[in-house]
Image (cartoon, grey):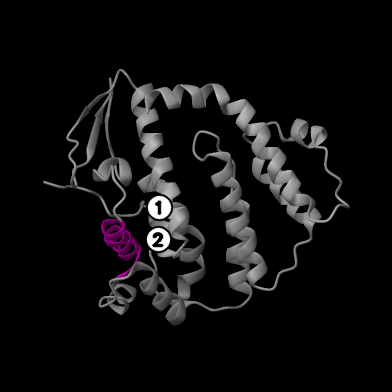
Amino acid sequence: MSTENFSVPNWLTKLVGKSNWLLWRLNVEEAINEVHNTSVYWEIIMDKPEHTIRESFEASRVASITSKSESSSYEFSGYSDEDSDVVITGSSNTSKHTGLQGSGLRVYNRSRLNIRARQILASSLELAPKMLIDRISDPHEAYLKLESFYGDISAQSIFVAWEKLLKVKYYPRGLPPDRFIERFQFALHDVRDLGVSLSPTVELAMFQQAIKSHCNSTKFMANMKVSIYAPDFMDSVYDQFLKDQRTELAPSMTILDALR
C-alpha cells in the first residue's frame, strides 16, 4: 500500500489568508522542492513549459540513480511501479524519500504528477484557503485562485520575486548547469515582469552571486573573454559558463553515462 507523503516540511508556515500571504509565498517553493527532492511539482503548480517539467523529471530520475549507485552500503526495499515509497536503510538510521524517488514514477506521467502537485499544494494551506480551492482539480488554476483571493500585486510582490531571485544558487550535484541558468533566468524574468529594471551589469553581478558558493566564480570571471559593453553580452557569459562547467563535470558525466 502506498504511504507516499504529500506534505510540506514543518518549518513552513501554512497559508492562513491575506495576513501571511507574503510569508507563505516567499517560502512555499523552497519547502516543496526540499521535502520532495525535485522542482517538478512546483513547476507544475506554476504552469512552466512542458519541456521544462520533463527535463526536471529526468534530472530527478537520474539523480536518484546516481544516489543509489553511490550508496552501495544502503539497502533499498519497498520500491514498486505504482505509489510505494523507497525505504533506505543505512548503518544507523532509516529515512523515507518522497517525491519522484519515493513515488514509483520511473516513467513520465503528467496526469499523476498533476494530481500529486495539487495534493502537495493543498498540504501547505490551512482550512479556509484549502476550502477555497476545494473544487479546483488543476494545480495551476488552484494557485491562481489563491493568488487572486489573498495576493496583493504591490511592493510585496516585488519583494517576493526579488527574494526568489536571491535564493537561486548553483549546486552542481543538484542541478545541471543548463537547468540552473534556466531557473536563474526564470527568476530574473519574474522580477522584470513586475516593472523592475535590471541592467545587464546588475544581471552579471546577480549571476556571480548565484554561482560563487559552488564554483570558482572569481577565476571564471577573470578568465571570461566578454566585453560588458557588447550588446547582449550576458548571452556570452551564460555560454562560457556552460562550456566551463561541462569541462569540469565531464569525468562525473562519463560515470553517469555508464550507469544508464
Residue found at x 46% / y 57%: 29
**Could you tell me how far apart the alpha carbons at marks 2 and 1 are, in whole angstroms?**
6 Å
Residue 207 in the image: x percent, y percent?
Answer: 70, 47
Q: Amino acid at mark 1?
A: Val
Q: Is residue 185 left or right of residue 95?
A: right
Asked if marks 2 and 1 touch (Cβ < 8 Å), the reply is yes
Q: Residue furthest left?
A: 1
Determine which quarter of the picture holds residue 80: top left
Residue 174 visible within the image:
yes
Q: Looking at the image, which residue sits at the far bottom? A: 149
Q: Residue at x 32, y 69 (%)?
A: 126
- Secondary structure under badge 2? helix
Q: Which mark is residue 44?
A: 2
Amino acid type, mark 2: Ile
Kindly identify which numbered label has been placed on residue 40. Answer: 1
Residue 114 is covered by the magenta coloring: yes
> What residue is rendered at 40% in x and 78% in y?
145
**Where does residue 106 sit, x and y in percent of width and height?**
28, 42
Whole-percent x and y of residue 166?
Answer: 63, 53
In this picture, which residue range is highlighted in magenta? 110-126
Determine whether the residue tagged by mark 1 lies in a helix, strand or loop.
Answer: helix
Judge left or right: residue 105 versus residue 141: left
Magenta segment: does it hold 109?
no
User: What type of secondary structure mainly makes up the magenta span?
Assistant: helix
Q: Is residue 11 visible?
A: no
